[in-house]
Amino acid sequence: DAKTTQPNSMESNEEEPVHLPCNHSTISGTDYIHWYRQLPSQGPEYVIHGLTSNVNNRMASLAIAEDRKSSTLILHRATLRDAAVYYCILRDPLTGTASKLTFGTGTRLQVTL
Amino acid sequence: NAGVMQNPRHLVRRRGQEARLRCSPMKGHSHVYWYRQLPEEGLKFMVYLQKENIIDESGMPKERFSAEFPKEGPSILRIQQVVRGDSAAYFCASARDRVPMNTEAFFGQGTRLTVV
């Protein structure tokens, strides 16, 4: 799997936007960029994914660099409930039997009042 | 539509006993993944199953661990002769298609196994 690099931790104030970066300089042309998050004492939950174009959903936005070597997860207004570990994951759906999400260390987001 | 259901949520076993962890995938999902998370560590893939088939068990320890996903009923992760090092949170995920095709995986709340 192509490797991703994320900061270990970030802090944000409540009600402010948060930009969570992810570097993936070895990304291949068919790798999808997936983001999951894990709230304390819970299982991971899907946030968003994309291939080339920027993506928006009710939870967040995903901005993908033109060369696809990096991406940014954007939480438009952070709340205390967004405090979690955020994982950026690359996967190529064409790689045969290898079919799993490989979690790295992620970014631990702290949100304060 | 109920989410991925895992039970029990908490399980305490003495060293040498067996632990059986159950996972009921979401309705319509035939792909199940098991992950283990040791305290203060990341999620590690263990096994990927489809109905009645183990597709990828590259993350499963060679001994004492087994998994199944029968035609009927939940997926079971079985740990025989548990040791203290097996204490962890075990998460199950299900997906409609083979992950990560253009789809998402849904995770359960996990089973927290404590070996005493």
Image: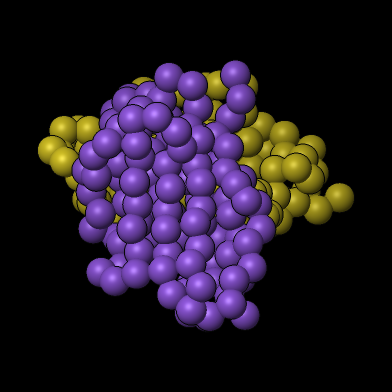
Chain colours: A yellow, B purple
Residue A103, by quadrant, is: bottom left
A39 horizontally vs B83: left or right: right
Q: Nearer the viewer, residue A93 or B28?
A: B28
How many numbered dots are placed on residues in this image?
0
Q: Is residue A1 visible?
A: yes
Q: Position of residue B35 (x, y in %)?
A: 43, 54
B104 horizontally vs B12: left or right: left
Q: Position of residue A20 (x, y in %)?
A: 54, 47
Q: Nearer the viewer, residue A6 or B40?
A: B40
Q: Position of residue B1 (x, y in %)?
A: 60, 19
The residue located at (63%, 62%) in the rendering is: B11
Going by the picture, which residue comes out furthest to the right? Answer: A113
Going by the picture, which residue comes out furthest to the left? Answer: A96
Q: Nearer the viewer, residue A38 or A49?
A: A38
B109 horizontally vs B96: left or right: right
The residue located at (55%, 34%) in the rendering is: B4
The residue located at (33%, 30%) in the rendering is: B71
User: Up-down: is B29 above or below B49?
Assistant: above
User: Up-down: is A84 above or below B72?
Assistant: below
Residue B96, by quadrant, is: top left
Residue B40, by quadrant, is: bottom right
The residue located at (33%, 58%) in the rendering is: B66
Q: Is residue B99 visible?
A: no
A31 horizontally vs A82: left or right: left
Q: Nearer the viewer, residue A87 or B42?
A: B42
User: Up-down: is A106 above or below A59?
Assistant: below
Q: Position of residue A102 (x, y in %)?
A: 35, 52
